[in-house]
Image (tube, rainbow, N blue to C red):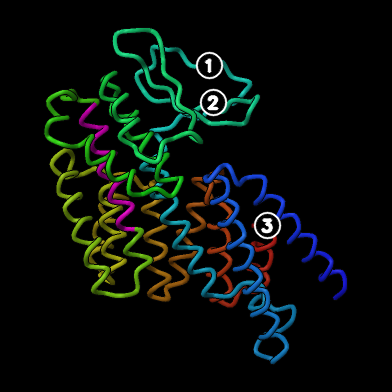
Amino acid sequence: MFAVLVFVICLEMFLHVMEHTTKRKPKYTDMLHKTTQELMIVGLIYLLVKLCVSTGLAKGNGLSSRCLGTTIRYQDLLMLLGAWESSVEGSTLTLLQADKPMPSAALQTPTQINDWRTNRRSLLIPVHKSDEIVELFTDEFPDDANDIMDILRAEIAPLEVWLSVAIEYYLQGRTDQFEVILDQATMPEAEEIYNDDAARKSRLKMFNAWVSHYVNVMWNEDDERRREIPAQKAVALFQKADRIDAQCPNTLVGKALMFMAKGEDERAERFLKNVLIADKENLPAILASALLHVRKKKFVEAKKLYQEAIVLHPKSPQASRIRMCFAYCCYQMGCVDKAKAVMKYA
């Protein structure tokens, strides 16, 4: 008990120093606060498990004391949304490691780089009719995105660059600027400038990235009436995406997630089947289908899909959470030893 007390005191002092150090960088301060919140959640879950053990509701060494079902379901949702958003955003940002060469100035797509000397990330904007580039450090993004959009307009920057800037604002928690950029980039006036096939594909990515924000809001909103507002906005964006490509897998998975948030699982299932018929290895569709089975308590079918996802995408950023969900299904099926082994590996 004394060791725990000392650890808590040291951790509190460390967080205090970190907060003071990052005070001048709002982005990093926000990241620190979010990390602290995650630690508090973990601590509360730990105390809950201890309470269950002390009251006899769970065995001290049982799986239920290590993996609460509700926590796993929440992890499942986070994993699913994360995989879908990654599939929407993944092709818009190219990460270059420090031991790789700098990209050519003639790149027609935006590039996000890490400066190994300062550990700072930046976006590169090609200068119109020139081999030069404009480098924008992400930790120096202005509060008003109009300042950056003036540069994008002046250089007639590719829509992929617009999308990368919007996503960076979203990752920093400034969703209002994220929406302003996407709104400006998809206006009819912009279509007169960006009217080739590459621009059409970029606009489709924009609509899907934008709609993913509203679907996230729906999943996090318990009030059915309040959920209807982001649902209407999502539907409007889906309609615009359908005018470009009605069979885009990301759009179809997004619609499935929207219907799942509304509790309309049968409609969601139809969209997911269409995606998997065209591409049986589509990770967001596989995970969404597995979540549907979990909601129906069809753990055998869900376990099979999670196993398939692990085999097809072993290096996915969501791999650890996929294994946790696989373990949860094993536990629900009575395969406790197997669930324990998978949880240790996860």
Mark 3 or 1: in front is 1
Specify the segment rendered in magenta.
199-215
The mark found on residue 345 in the picture is 3
Secondary element at tag 3: helix
- Look at the image and tell me whether residue 268 can be seen: yes
Contact check, label 2 and label 1, Cβ < 8 Å: yes
Q: Is the magenta region chiefly helix, strand or loop?
A: helix
Is residue 249 among what the camera can see?
no
Which residue corresponds to mark 2? 96
Q: Nearer the viewer, residue 291 or 197?
A: 197
In the displayed structure, does residue 269 sit left or right of residue 171? left
Residue 311: image tag:
none
The image shows residue 247 at horizontal and vertical percentages of 21, 44
When the figure is inspected, residue 30 is found, relative to residue 115, above or below; the finding is: below
Amino acid found under the numbered disc labelled 3:
Tyr
The picture places residue 136, in percent across and down from the top left corner, at: 45, 26
Could you tell me residue 210's position as x and y percent?
Answer: 29, 47
Give the mark nearer the N terminus: 3 vs 1.
1
Q: Which residue is mark 1?
A: 102
Q: CA distance from mark 2 to mark 1?
A: 8 Å
